[in-house]
Image (tube, grey):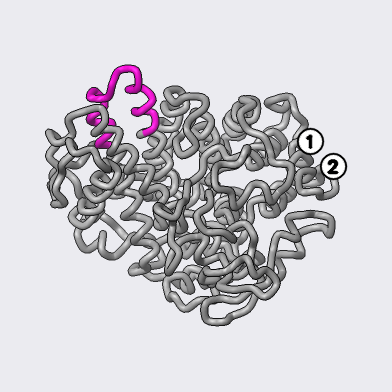
Amino acid sequence: MNFIRSFSFIFAVVLIAAGCNKKLDISPQQNIDPDDIKTSDDVKAVLFGGYSKLQDADAFGESFLLTADLLAAEQQIYFAGSFVDYVDLNDKTQIETNLTAFNIWENAYVIINIANVVLDKIELVDEDEREAVAAEAKFIRGLAYFELVKYYGKPWSAGNTTTNLAVPLMTKAVYEYNAAEHLLPRATVSDIYTQVIDDLVDAAEGLPEIAEKARASSSAARAILSRVYLSQGNLAGAAEEANAVIESGNYELPTTYAGSFNNAANSSEDIFAIQQTSQSNSGTANFGLITFYMANYSDDEPSIGGGRGDVKVDPSHIDIYEPEDNRGDFYYYGYSIVGADGLHTRKWSSFYKVIPVVRLAEMYLTRAEANYRKGGAPIGGVDPLDDLNTVRGRARASLLTSIDDESIFAEERFRELAFEGDRLWTLKRLQLDIDGLPYDDNKLVLPVPSSELDVNAKLVQNPGY
């Protein structure tokens, strides 16, 4: 990665996270003096910087979710704005200088190095907090690497996981830039998945069962593990992790679908979510998930407005819902900042609200699919049909009487998780076409940023760029 530029971001994050902790005094330059991190509070300040970067618009504040949905836009969304990088992703014509591809890569490696610094300095943390802080760092690192391997490597379902390339694997803290040590080649898809699983398993064991709303819990690690295992076709593993989250009893579906979104704090079903406030948010001007999705103004909904409104709901999307399904009514008509009209989702219709990363509804859908596809006795003892109906019932959709084929699981995930960045990864793992392209098409993988290739001769570009 381009450490020279990324270092300045790392320092800024550390300083902001430290707040009034005057003991952590690191000047914004290309080197971090490890001796400047001296106390338990210093290490935790760095950790909180990792959470801040997960919240960033280049992570779950926008790009991790919106980029996936632009790449799987058919019958879901279309980009009506003028930002070329987003238009190209929508059209699958992105090039190696695509700014979103660069921002995701760079921000993820900032997150990873923050986690590596925390782990390198873990002995400074008070003994009663040490295990949990290390587990949080591993959760953050595993989550970042999982997003990277999905975006820059071929999907696990494409096979050749020991030869297909993903991203460089860096697990050591970088304090002082050294080209010979820090300019690494791309690791394989298999190598990155191994690291992700190791980190998340350790996180699940070391994190508390219940955590502060903005921080990771053991259930959050298990929920992400269920995604990882499902993407690998490890159906028993996916069902076991999803079942553990469901059976924990710490989460429940709100009585209405609307209750899962636009909340000032985590809803009862948010297993892990990104907190947004007027002081710390994913953008209200030219970036951020809510900014792009929320209409600039709406005659029908005058209380909703101020966004760019560049992301519109494809009108055909409404056809996937039955008339009685409340999810089919979760839309409004509005205009973009330049007056383009169209449908908008209510999921992202209020500034400074929580952005769910993983919800309980997904765990029911994962357990249902994994149990059905693996066959045999269902893990958790719940029939897959009942799990699907738990999710459908909350939305007031009619209850299913049977499961005819596996396609129903992709359909149910689409109904429940639309506009949450799920569609692309579901279609890839099920080897289904995406916007008229094969699931493993080169243009459904982001390019290695050209700026990274310029500084690191060990990197090679993805096919198709």
* Residue plotted at (29% across, 65% down): 450
In the image, is residue 427 above or below residue 247?
below
- Does any portion of residue 152 appear in the rendered image? no
Q: Is residue 181 magenta?
A: no
User: Compared with residue 94, is residue 434 higher up or lower down, i.e. above or below?
Assistant: above
- Residue occupying the far bottom of the picture: 339
Q: Is residue 449 left or right of residue 288?
A: left
Q: Which residue is mark 1?
A: 386
Q: Amino acid at mark 2?
A: Ser
Q: Quadrant of residue 115?
A: top left
Judging from the image, what secondary structure is the residue with disc 2 in? loop
* Element type where label 1 sits in the image: helix
Residue 453 visible within the image: yes
Part of the protein shown in magenta: 116-136
Residue 188 at x, y = what percent? 37, 45
Q: Is residue 50 left or right of residue 445?
A: left
> Left of 325 or right of it: where is 300?
left
Q: Which residue is mark 2?
A: 402
